[in-house]
Image: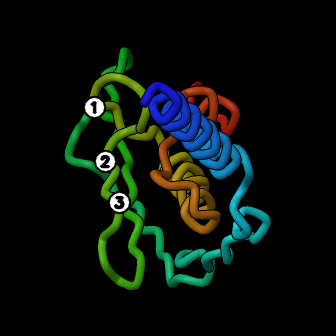
Amino acid sequence: MKTKTILLVIIAFCACMMVGYYAHKIIIQPSSSAGKKEPVKENPYAKAKIEIKTYQTNIQIVNADNINDSNWGYDIYIYNALYIHQPNIPAINGNRGFKSENDARKIAAFVVNKIRNNNMPPSVKISELDSIGVLK
């Protein structure tokens, strides 16, 4: 009886060691599909019909010389559907619009470039606004 018990313990120990060894190999070794590359998905915005429309906002600012300065914003349409409505300068606090139509158009074109390159969401940083020359 003692020999049978010892033999069963040895068999169980060997079985556990084998299971542990093969489980370790399965976890450590990469699967056969690991070397395969995933197919690259086509960028849905690369050739999309994207349109920029600039507009004057309703916000009027009276500067130090008592001159009314109009603010500008932009809309971005993808396939004639409004995608972005931006009445103020992104990334800065407050509701300050762009000082000129040209500034609004420059940032809108920058955002469209991000969309075309599938950089989503197409956010704008203060450093990017500064490097484009919108923050003066």
The picture quadrant where one finds residue 16 is top right
Q: Position of residue 5 (x, y in %)?
A: 45, 30
Task: Residue under label 1, please give it.
Answer: 95
The residue sitting at the left extreme is 58
From what the image shows, is residue 7 above or below residue 48? above
Dot 2 and dot 3 residues touching (CB under 8 Å): no
Residue labelled with disc 3 = 84
Q: Earlier in the sequence, mark 1 or mark 3?
A: 3
In the rendered image, which quarter contains the C terminus?
Answer: top right
Given the current orientation, which residue lies at the most extreme top position? 64
Closest to the observer, 27 or 95: 27
Rounded to the nearest angstrom, the CA distance separating label 2 from label 3 is 10 Å
Q: Position of residue 106 (x, y in %)?
A: 59, 52
Cα separation, mark 1 vs mark 3, equals: 16 Å
Marks 2, 3: nearer the viewer? 3
Residue in the image at 45% along x and 51% along y: 121
Q: Secondary structure at mark 3?
A: strand
Tags 1 and 2 in contact by the CB under 8 Å rule?
A: yes
**What residue appears at the point 31 percent right and 57 percent down from the top-left corner?**
85
